Image: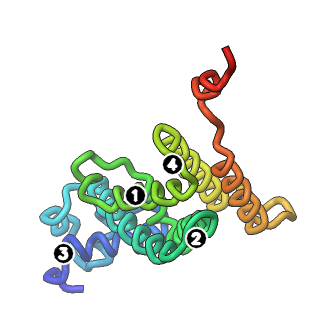
Amino acid sequence: MARAGVTVERLAEAAAELADEVGLENVTVSELARRFGVRDASLYSHIRNAHELRVRVAVLALAELADRVAAALAGRAGKDALVAFANAYRDYAKEHPGRYTATQVELDPETAEASAARRHSDMTRAILRGYSLAEPDQTDAVRLLGSTFHGFVSLEQAGGFRHHPRGADESWSRVLDTVDVALRNWPAHASDADAGRAP
């Protein structure tokens, strides 16, 4: 590939492809330079270091995943929306393991604000409003969903479910059933319960 073909956008896309092939932690400037047929130094006019490459992969992956989730959620509400959201999340992680890992990279506030991270938050909260959850419960529920989905997907990617005859798909379905029940039966705050007691 000619040096003239190197742009920040193409570097990000190539880094994302490399991350899916060899893991985000193995994305290096040297390997990308080799793929573009240029010297390492040629890439430093476009990016500062490997960390910046990973941040760019994170921004790209967040946008791709947000688009996929938005398409999956269209016209859905309640449990249907929850399941569509979760399945889009899991499927993306299976298809793009390196990019999925990149979605967990911590972004500086300015980069995060300019990325699709806000769209992810807004879509999650829209699902939760379907369960009639308001603040502060909504934030707690956002964290519950993120922890549950990321935990399951990460363990699955690491091969943590391969040594048991129970299939991961069956467990995933039951996890989503359980999360739906939890959201529909969200516990009241202690102060709310106290307010309802007779004097």
Which image quarter holds the N terminus?
Answer: bottom left
Residue projecting furthest to the right? 165
- Can you tell which quarter of the image residue 34 is in? bottom left
Determine whether 168 is above or below 137 in the image: below
Q: CA distance from mark 3 to mark 1?
A: 31 Å
Badge 3 local density, few (<14 within 10 Å), some, or many (20+)? some
- Mark 2: amino acid: Ala
Image height of 11 relative to 116, above or below: below
Height in image: 187 above or below 107?
above
- Image spot of residue 54 (x, y percent): 34, 58
Residue drawn at 39 percent across, 52 percent down: 105
**In the image, residue 199 lies at what x, y percent?**
66, 13
Judge from the rendering whether residue 6 lies leftward or rightward of residue 53; answer left or right: left
Marks 4 and 3: which is nearer the front? 4
Picture coordinates of residue 4, whole percent (x, y)? 13, 82
Seen at 16% across and 80% down, the residue is 3
Numbered marks: total:
4
Callout 1, which amino acid? Asp
Residue bearing mark 1: 122
Res. 25 visible in picture = no
The amino acid type of the residue labelled 3 equals Thr
Image marks 1 and 2: residues in contact by CB distance under 8 Å: no
Residue at label 2?
A: 84
Q: Marks 4 and 3: CB-CB under 8 Å?
A: no
Residues at marks 4 and 1, CA–CA distance in whole angstroms: 10 Å
Q: CA distance from mark 2 to mark 4?
A: 16 Å
Q: Secondary structure beneath disc 1?
A: helix
Look at the image and tell me whether residue 33 can be seen: yes
Number of the label disc, if any, that sits on residue 34: none
Classify mark 2: residues with Cα within 10 Å, few (<14), some (14-19) or many (20+).
Answer: some
Write down the residue under mark 3. 7
